[in-house]
Image: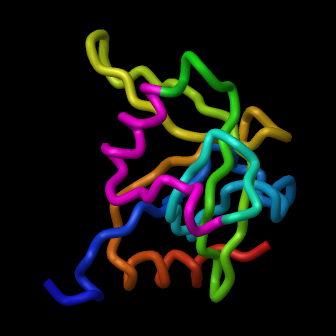
Amino acid sequence: MAASDQTLVCVKQVKQEVANEWDESMPLPRDIIEGFSEHDVDDTDKSFVSVKTNSEFSSQLGKINQRVESIWIQVRRGDGLLKLQTCIVQQKVSVLRRKYTIQATTDHRHIADLADLTLKQCIELQGTYSL
């Protein structure tokens, strides 16, 4: 599999439609989620749990949801890496199935819709949104 075909966990869109209420501290469409931590850490390389797929990330969030209200995520935004504090939220997919995702700590309407996308698809998303 070529590196460009590898999938990444990307914020595909956010449920809050009002883009002018977004800010840089929120998960934004086009962010690539590289990892998460239950604690605010300075050492970004070793303390973040790597994220490979959306379903794996949702499963991990479901496991820690009872212990913590918020987590720190490491995202790639453009050429830089950022650390953002987010809340864990549960979404009902069906009666028996639940999915977990993240929302901005500053605005509970700002819920991230995550997807497994290729790097090319994430870059294309980066061109469709602007702050």
Left or right: residue 40 versus residue 91 is right
In which quadrant will I find the C terminus? bottom right
Q: Residue 16 is drawn in which quadrant?
A: top right
Please tell me which residue lies in front, 66 or 79: 66
- The type of colouring in the image is rainbow
Residue 55 among magenta residues = yes
Highlighted range, magenta: 44-63
The prevailing secondary structure element of the residues shown in magenta is helix
Q: Residue 63 is drawn in which quadrant?
A: top left
Please tell me which residue lies in front, 57 or 16: 57
In which quadrant will I find the N terminus? bottom left
Residue 76 vs 108, above or below: the answer is below
Please name the residue shown 56% across and 51% down the image: 36
Please name the residue shown 72% across and 61% down the image: 83
Please name the residue shown 64% across and 25% down the image: 68
Residue 40: where, in percent of width, then height? 75, 48
Residue 98: where, in percent of width, then height? 37, 22
Residue 53 vs 6, above or below: the answer is above
Please tell me which residue lies in front, 62 or 44: 44
Residue 97: where, in percent of width, then height? 29, 20
Residue 82: where, in percent of width, then height? 71, 69
Residue 30 among magenta residues = no
